[in-house]
Amino acid sequence: MQQDQFEALVKSLCQHSTMPEVLNALKSCEDQEIAEAAAALTGQFRLAEIDGEKRIYHVSMQENEQGEPEEFAEWIMNDGDDVIKFVAWFFYDNFDLKLKDIYQAAGRTYRQPKRL
């Protein structure tokens, strides 16, 4: 995929208002690799209310130190957050693209989370 095509895709994805809408758009992407990665994620997200926030988690199975399967949950974003967070996570997690580059493709500025 050319850079201008990637930028157009990211900008179009950011026009959606919810994470499920973005995931559906990714599943219907013309780029087969992107569509397959999105399809593989279907059913792997959970919504949990923690500290008064509705958080969206990606839930997968991974082996623990004993070699047993264990559920692993990664916090992606809060319900209602800008979908750029999900778009950036998707391309970072599946295609090793830098978060800064994904935000830049969307015409946005990436801000590094503050460390505690």
Image (tube, rainbow, N blue to C red):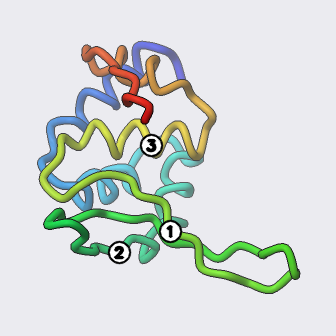
Distance Cα–Cα, label 3 vs label 1? 14 Å
Q: Nearer the viewer, mark 2 or mark 1?
A: 1
Q: On the rendered structure, is 97 left or right of 19?
A: right
In the rendered image, the residue lying farthest to the bottom is: 68
Amino acid type of the residue that numbered disc 1 sits on in the rendered structure: Ala
For label 2, the SS is strand
| Residue 53, numbered circle | none
Residue drawn at the location 55% of the way across and 48% of the way down:
32
Residue drawn at the location 52% of the way across and 46% of the way down:
34
Quickly name the residue at label 1.
73
How far from the left and from the top, in percent, is residue 49?
22, 73
Circle 2 packing at 10 Å, graded few (<14), some (14-19), many (20+), is some
Amino acid type of the residue that numbered disc 2 sits on in the rendered structure: Arg
For label 3, the SS is helix
| Residue 46, numbered circle | 2
Q: Quadrant of residue 72?
A: bottom right
Q: Quadrant of residue 27?
A: bottom left
For label 1, the SS is strand
Residue drawn at the location 23% of the way across and 55% of the way down:
78
Quickly name the residue at label 3.
89
Q: Pick whichever of labels 2 and 3 is earlier in the sequence.
A: 2
Circle 1 packing at 10 Å, graded few (<14), some (14-19), many (20+), is some
Distance Cα–Cα, label 2 vs label 1? 9 Å
For residue 80, above or below residue 102: below
Q: Quadrant of residue 113?
A: top left
Q: Pick whichever of labels 3 and 1 is earlier in the sequence.
A: 1
Amino acid type of the residue that numbered disc 3 sits on in the rendered structure: Trp
Distance Cα–Cα, label 2 vs label 3? 15 Å
Q: Nearer the viewer, mark 3 or mark 1?
A: 1
Asked if labels 1 and 2 touch by Cβ distance under 8 angstroms, the answer is: yes
